[in-house]
Amino acid sequence: MFLQRQVPRQTYSEHLQVFAASSYGRPQINNGNKILLPASALQQLIFIKQNGPMIFKISSTQSQRFTYVGVLEFVAEEGTCIIPDWLFENMNFFPECFVLISLEKSLPLGKLIKIQPHETAFVDLPDPRAILENQFRNYICLTQGETITITFNKNKYMIDIVEVQPKTEKLAVCINEADVEIDFLQPLDYNETPLPNLIKNNSSLGMEQDQQLQQQQQAVFTGKGVRLDGKTGVTQPRKQSEDVKIVSEPYNPRKNKLVNGLRQSEEAQIFMGSCTKVGAQKKQL
């Protein structure tokens, strides 16, 4: 009786139940995209020749969404895998749901990554590029279209991976020991402050002043009046141009001065009253 020798598989692909890192008591893996696999996965991977770091593709069994990750340790319980919280949320997983974990033979080395922060607060940090490069050391690869979470000074910042180059059908690149250029796009919450309107005053105080000015210009007296000869009558309204002269520019006294100055007639210069001369009696003029 001959025993059949078992030929080791040349790839790894398993359906595993997925759990978030916080529920497993391993929050430290939230700072990157490395997951925990069971020890049985390591036994299968030993016989597989792999060039470079181990990269795995996580595919949802509920949708067509996928992403690529690395592996940190083989300490998860059999039949399960543990992934970072931010990845668990982005992939819309739920506790104990099944995902497909498969070994990816190779990914191209990244050359350019275009990222877009969700908040302007991230680019306002002292050196956001250095912070991002330091955080990327915990990442084996990056997938186009995913949203990662960066933690700095106990603050979390969400970053969209808008584009990765070189472009391939896998839409992912390996950044492990790769010279990658990072291109920052405008944050999602960026709002350019509009310039103040210097032509029209839209404030409540300015609008109230404009209304008062219009009422003063349009006010025309139409009631009863008493004439100097004692007769009464109703005044007829006159045209606005006869009552109010609209001035389009500030009054300039130099521009409206009299050419020859102010003159009086000879009659206006004759004093018709009485006066008292100092040191003399009152004299009638």
Image (spheres, rainbow, N blue to C red):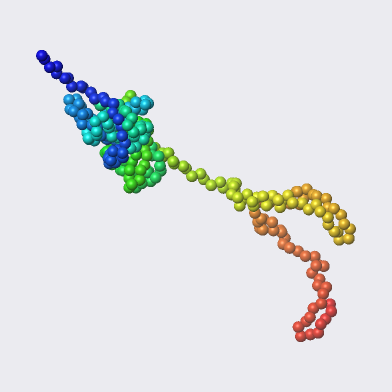
Looking at the rendered image, the quarter that the N terminus falls into is top left
Q: Is residue 9 above or below residue 160?
A: above
Q: Residue lying at the far top in this picture: please name it.
A: 1
Q: Quadrant of residue 233?
A: bottom right
Q: Residue at x 24, y 34 (%)?
A: 76
The quarter holding residue 276 reads: bottom right
Residue 238 can be seen in this image = yes
> Position of 143 compared to 40: left or right?
right
Quadrant in the rendering for residue 82:
top left
Question: Residue 93 location, x and y as percent?
Answer: 35, 32
- Residue in view at x 84 percent, y 77 percent: 285
User: Looking at the image, which residue is at 79% across and 78% down?
Assistant: 275
Query: Where is 268 relative to 83, above or below?
Result: below
Residue plotted at (34% across, 26% down):
61
Return the x and y of residue 116 as percentages of the image width and height.
38, 37
- Position of residue 205 relative to residue 280, above or below, is above
